[in-house]
Amino acid sequence: MSNDRSSEWLYYWRALASMPDVRWQAEYPFDKDVVNPWTGKPGRHRFDWALPHLRIAVEIDGGVWERHGGRHGTDEDRRKLAIAAAMGWLVFRFSPQMLESNAKVCVRLVERALDIRSGLEVKEKRKMFQNN
């Protein structure tokens, strides 16, 4: 991503992450206590960013866009997402191009999910936080 666009993404992401009760965990091992149905072994998948208590995750696809999705277009990645879905996770996947073209929309989509899953309007949280 270009510097201006990555700065825009970071600006919106930091605003979202700075709200009260929003504690993102990086490289979160979401399925470590679950047996992978394809391998019969404990899960080893991780999300780039996760809010475990709300089961919301954000995945940012690799830095280089490839025609068929690169690593993110493989069956292993599909298995990861299927396991996550079966566990009740809501997973947002963004490409660098999506973040470059409109970071604000990407963050607003995640923000809306927080709204719904937390039961407390994110706008109200933001208002409370800004007034302190």
Image: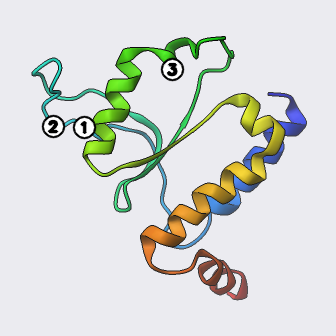
How far across and down, in percent of the image, does residue 97 sit?
75, 30
Whether the residues at callouts 3 and 2 have beta carbons within 8 Å, the answer is: no
Secondary structure, mark 3, is helix
Residue that appears at 21% across and 29% down: 43
Whether the residues at callouts 1 and 2 have beta carbons within 8 Å, the answer is: yes
**29 over 87 or under it: above or below:** above
Residue that appears at 51% across and 20% down: 72
**100 over 112 or under it: above or below:** above
Report the residue marked by disc 1.
31
Residue that appears at 66% across and 30% down: 95
Q: Which kind of residue does numbered mark 3 sit on?
A: His
N-terminal of the two: label 1 or label 3? 1
Mark 3 crowd level (few <14, some 14–19, many ≥20, 10 Å Cα): some
Q: Which kind of residue does numbered mark 1 sit on?
A: Asp
**2 over 118 or under it: above or below:** above
Residue that appears at 77% across and 53% down: 104
**Is 13 left or right of 5, judged from the image as shown?**
left
- What is the C-alpha distance between the residues marked 1 and 3? 18 Å
How far across and down, in percent of the image, does residue 29 sit?
32, 37
Report the residue marked by disc 2.
34
Please state which of the two labelled residues, at mark 1 or mark 3, is closer to the viewer.
Answer: 3
Secondary structure, mark 2, is loop
Report the residue marked by disc 3.
72
